Amino acid sequence: MRIVVFASGRGSNFEAIQENIAKGILPDEITALITDNADAQAIAIARRYKIPAYIVETDKRTGLLSADEERRIMQVLKNISFDIIVLAGFMHIFSGEFLERLNGCRIVNIHPSLLPQYKGLNPHKRVIADAVRFSGCTVHFVNDKVDSGDIICQQLVEVEKEDNEETLASRILKYEHIIYSEALNMIRDV
């Protein structure tokens, strides 16, 4: 599959996918990175792997993309060959109209909780506050609602008594790096 990655920050899931491609674990190619953050660490990762990076500025105060922002993203996508869009820390919601314009192109996302629990922002904080025993991460298809698309796969992670938001996030992130590639292998065969 030809993959376009959308990332807004450090790009650790982007890098994990690219490393799995380099190792032959994934028989895919990342054809571009799209980011809404000119300072994203993901850009340095793209440069290291000679992957074209495109910056499309967005209003970071809201999770919803404006019609103009979606139009600018679509203009970038028109110049890229891709089969699937992989969200790797891209903190925006696409409209139904945008998804329709992609003509059935699949978009996948990873979320650091066991969906449908703890959708949206700050899942680790909420998990710790609720003193639940298990959390984890979920790879799912994207629709026009927050973290509500069909689930592809999940990884259960035990919440330890001494956990805080940072330690839980760090432990879950290690599993994100594993299951995102597993999910891409799963959906390639569908």
Image: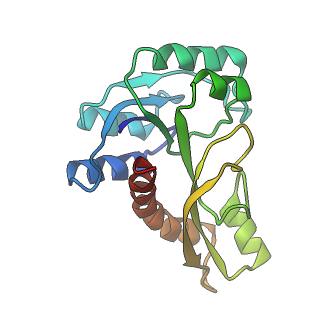
* 119 shown above or below 168: above
Of residue 77 and residue 190, the one placed in the foreground of this image is: 190
- Residue 130, compared with residue 20, is above or below; it is below
Identify the residue shown where x is 29% and y is 31%: 51
Q: Say whether residue 43 is left or right of residue 94.
A: left
Q: Residue furthest left?
A: 23
Residue 149, percent from left and from top: 67, 48
Please say whether residue 87 is visible from this viewpoint.
yes
Q: Which quadrant would residue 125 be assigned to in this image?
A: bottom right
Q: Nearer the viewer, residue 112 or 48?
A: 112
Q: Is residue 6 visible?
A: no
**In which image quadrant can residue 63 be found?**
top right
Q: How many discs appear?
A: 0
Counting from the top left corner in percent of width and height, residue 152 is at: 55, 57
Residue at the image position 60 percent from the left and 78 percent from the top: 163
| Residue 93 pos. (x, y %) | 68, 36
Residue 39 falls left or right of residue 151 = left
Q: Does residue 141 appear left or right of residue 176 in this picture? A: right
Q: Residue furthest right?
A: 130
Residue found 21% across the figure and 53% down from its top: 24
Nearer to me, 185 or 29: 185
Quarter in which the N terminus is drawn: top left
Outermost residue toward the front in this view: 190
Measuring 52% from the left and 30% from the top, which residue is drawn there? 37
